Image (spheres, rainbow, N blue to C red):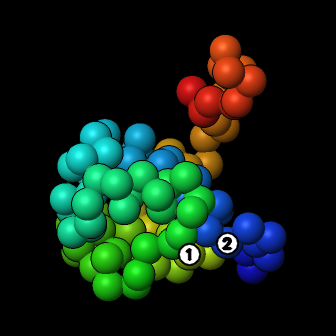
Amino acid sequence: MPKKETNFAGAVGARLVRLQEILGLTQAALAELMEMSPQALANAQSGSNAPKPWKLRRLHDEHGITSDFVYFGDVKGLPQWIAKELAKPVAVVPTTKGRKKVA
């Protein structure tokens, strides 16, 4: 069972960023796929809000990404290659503005 999230929208946003990287999409391409404006996706990725469930439909249809993963971090049901990529450690490096950047 996945761990309980203390910041739901922030966790969803982090997963969307990671999926974007794994799928090799630009933010604009992911926004188009999810039928969102780039600004709405940027807001979701920054943790301001979580996308509505119907915005995940094409992500599932085209890439097999489940809403259970996006919302709750549950990797069961994801394509195996995506689950393997998600299991790899992600390097975190400091940036010049004092924020951490995922490399």
Q: Which residue is mark 2?
A: 8
Which residue is tagged 1? 71
Residue in the picture at 61% in, 40% down: 88
Q: Considering only vertical position in the picture, is 3 above or below 26?
A: below
Q: Is residue 56 left or right of residue 74?
A: left
Q: Nearer the viewer, residue 13 or 19?
A: 13
Q: Residue furthest bottom?
A: 54
SS of the residue under disc 1: helix
On the rendered image, what quadrant is the C terminus found in?
top right
Q: Which mark is residue 89?
A: none
Residue appearing at x 34%, y 54% in the figure: 39
Where residue 92 appears, as percent x and y from the top left, is 69, 29
Q: Do labels 1 and 2 touch, CB within 8 Å?
A: yes
The residue positioned 80% from the left and 70% from the top of the image is 6
Question: Who comes first in sequence, dot 1 or dot 2?
Answer: 2
Q: Give amino acid for label 1.
A: Tyr
Question: Residue 32 appears at what percent x and percent y?
Answer: 19, 59
Given this view, does label 1 or label 2 mark the residue nearer the observer?
2
